[in-house]
Image (cartoon, rainbow, N blue to C red):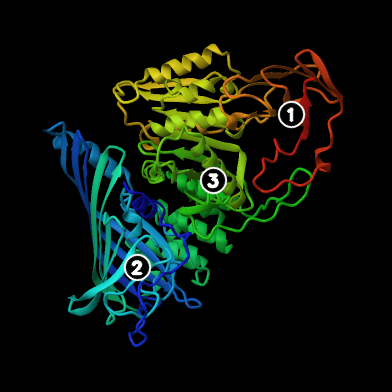
Amino acid sequence: MSPAVVAVVIFLLVFVCVVTVGAAPTQTAPTWRYALHPGDHLIYGYTFQRRTQSDEEQTRVEARFRTHVLVAAEPAGRISLGFQRNREAAELTEYRSKGKDRLAHELPGFQKRMQARPSRFAEAMEISPGGEPLYPWEISRETYSHILDVLHEVMNLPPLPLAKGEAWRSPSLPQLEFRWVNDESIHGKTCHHVEGTVPDKSLKLSYWWSPESGVLEQVALDGNYRNFDTVAHETARMELESRTRGEQFSTWLDSADTRQGALQAILLTPEVAVSAGLLAPVLGSGEPASQALALAVDSRRKIDVPSGVLATLRQSASARVQLMAEAFSDSGHSQELADECRRPFPPRPPPVKFGTVLEVARTSKEDGAIPYLLRVPLTYREDRPAPLMIYLSGGAGFAIDGVNSAENIVSETNYLVLYPQAAGYWWTPEVARRLDAVLHDAFERYNVDRDRIFLTGFSNGGTGALYFATLWPQRFAAVVSLMGAGQCNEAVKAGLPNLGNLPLLFVHGENDPRITPDCSTTTHAALTDLHPAIKPELKILPHRAHDITLDSDDGLTLAFFKGKLRNPFPREVNLTLSDSLAARGYWVEILDGKAGKSSVEARVKADNTIEIHSHDLKRLRLYLRPELLPNPGDVHIVWNGKKMFSGPLRDVCALPPLPLAADPKLDLSDTRDLELP
């Protein structure tokens, strides 16, 4: 897959904000604008096809949707829209494996997956009159795809008047060069046909905008991409079927075909008026996705919900509704945004959008901008610490594959979910450094509970999860490797001694031909032989191959994470400098070690003595806190038999306040630098 296509289809590149026009504009040509007004309701027929081919398999999937565009408001020059795409059919029409027709064998599994996946998808957006989105679009879509994120019912129109044949670029899709190709008649209306392509022509996005109707009459997508050893060809087409005007919000909320799209628009745009009476029928609708959205609107708008209704919703069969009802019940009890020394934190802004969106970490000039995907649950509040799960994808390490294999499951949780991008193997120092920058960015933007950060991944990502755990064990509350290579990977093997204080779970398929299960069983055995403080766990799933992700792991990962909290101050720390990035483990940091040679064993004894033994290093830094010591009083530090210090700990509240991205426990500490003579 070319770098240009990866840049466009995985992350949308909304962080590029320069518009380039290919030729001088023609001032006499009319400006292109959408003629959309509150109460407008557009319906599009929508088809999607995907063909995939690898050395061993060929598949074809077709799906049909009916998509509703609801114009909710027109505040201050913006157009607020709700979208709901309802799946009407999905078919697996071809499946060949090693030259044999396996369609009949695969159909039951495909149908089961479709039944488990929601048939309704909704999102909201505010656009300029020219179609420029004001926020990132939702990444998790109505069907799995690497390129579908560029296709919407409203596309970017030219930013300036122009003539046929002129080209321009959109701020939100800068890698696509758009061109007004010609005029065609669609549905009896004259339409301007526009095509956008990437430099290598592997992706073409076309739309037909009518100056008569002021909307898109058709939109089409055609693209190819490679995902590891599989080539995918996808096509999609939306065609306007009807348009009505002057509809009421109550009408949209009454219909399951439009309800979620309307609620998304209300949640995004404060100017859309809403009342308790308007939302009450939704809370009693029995539709979990709509009920959760209505509770989110009630919470953000501070609309009261009767206690009896909340009590009923807390007993819902849907975990999503239960979590949202609990969050609403607790919304009146705000928490003080201050550290343990009662110094206020800078307030974090509320999220503009909920769902899975693109974020960009701004780093040094060397790294530039590092995009990543992040899911913000409806339960998230900026004044409450939220648990964070980091999910590393398999295959070629594309973040979108993580989204596609997790969204059904994580939608029933209150996790912030971080989907980083490797676009290669996870276990390299460069990728680790970029992930570190992304984590710091997420900590600054969002109120993350630093004692509830969980790490998992599948295949390539399962190996990466173990690698990052060996680098930064102090960051995580628990780690799960799904089909990871474990100590079959040398980078992971070198850091195994660092994992003694982490809850670890290995999950593998009994018949995995790609990464054989002995990679997990031998890693589990090797860790057990190290006598860790927390014994690792192992699950070999019978009759399973290389097919275990978060949505197909029999619920093991989320069950393993449930209730676990990080222990930032274990009384024993073993730290092997497997890599320069692994210089710190909990409250111990190596300052002058040699990768592959230096190691430290540190333990806190009952009399408050910190006893340290090390190899091939002379300088250490300790991050000390009262929680680390068994008893009040002085601390005594002995290193390789030499008495280094004896005395009281410093008052951490006398230290300067920490930046938002710092660890509020491990970094707010009495820092002691030690050096052997």
Left or right: 212, with 531 as reference point:
left
Quickly name the residue at label 1: 622
Q: Which mark is residue 155?
A: 2
Left or right: 435, with 57 as reference point:
right
Between the C-alphas of marks 2 and 3, the distance is 29 Å
Which of the 4 quarters of the picture holds residue 396? Answer: top left
Left or right: 350, with 557 as reference point:
right
Label 2 vs label 1, nearer the camera: 1
Quickly name the residue at label 3: 438
Q: Are dots 2 and 1 in contact, CB under 8 Å?
A: no
Is residue 20 visible in the rendered image? The answer is yes
Percent position of residue 417, x then y: 49, 44
Percent position of residue 49, x then y: 21, 52
Q: Secondary structure at mark 3?
A: helix
Identify which amino acid the numbered label 3 is placed on.
Answer: Val
| Relative vertical location of residue 93 with respect to residue 185 in this rendering, above or below | above
Answer with mark 3 or mark 1, whichever residue precedes in sequence: 3
Answer with mark 2 or mark 1, whichever residue precedes in sequence: 2
Q: Residues within 10 Å of mark 2 (few under 14, many from 20)?
A: many
Which of the 4 quarters of the picture holds residue 626? Answer: top right
- Please name the residue shown 76% across and 43% down the image: 340
| Relative vertical location of residue 330 with respect to residue 229 in this rendering, above or below | below
Label 2 vs label 3, nearer the camera: 3
